[in-house]
Image (tube, rainbow, N blue to C red):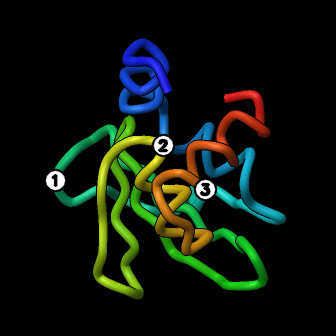
Amino acid sequence: MDNFTLERWRSLDAARVLAALAAHAKLDAAYVPATSALSTRWHATVGGQDFELLLTGPKFWDTRNAKGGGGAVDLVMHLERLSFKQASARLVGLGL
């Protein structure tokens, strides 16, 4: 993996990655952010598992599992329980 691709994945909007991964993803329009006005809350199903995620740019927070991270690779690793190498291949396969 080249540095350009890795840097692009680090800054990729988490909502875009979620949309590509999820069987179902719905923005919670009733959500009022507590800290960052840019945060959004999503309800999604990935790999048969339901998630409630707070997304702010490339960062994410899984409210049910109390885990978060930043960047597309971290999000794929978390949602699909993949290794770095597997998550990278998944992103390539998704065309991201």
Q: Residue at x 38, y 27 (%)?
A: 11
Residue 81 as seen in the image, left or right of residue 55: right
User: Mark 2 vs mark 3: which is more N-terminal?
Assistant: 2
Query: Secondary structure beneath disc 1?
Result: loop
Q: Which residue is mark 1?
A: 35
User: Mark 1 vs mark 3: which is more N-terminal?
Assistant: 1
**Residue 62 position (above or below residue 48):** above
Query: Secondary structure beneath disc 3?
Result: helix
Residue contact between numbered discs 2 and 3, judged by CB atoms under 8 Å: no
**Residue at the far right in the pictured view:** 23
Q: Nearer the viewer, residue 68 or 39?
A: 68
Q: Residue at x 78, y 38 (%)?
A: 93
The type of residue carrying mark 1 is: Thr
Q: Quadrant of residue 63?
A: bottom left
**Residue 38 position (above or below residue 81):** above
Q: Which residue is mark 3?
A: 86
Q: Nearer the viewer, residue 71 or 92?
A: 92
| Residue depth check, mark 1 versus mark 3: number of the one nearer the observer | 3
Q: Quadrant of residue 24?
A: bottom right
Classify 10 Å Cα crowding around label 1: few (below 14), some (14-19), many (20 and above). Answer: few
The type of residue carrying mark 3 is: Gln
Q: Which residue is mark 2?
A: 72
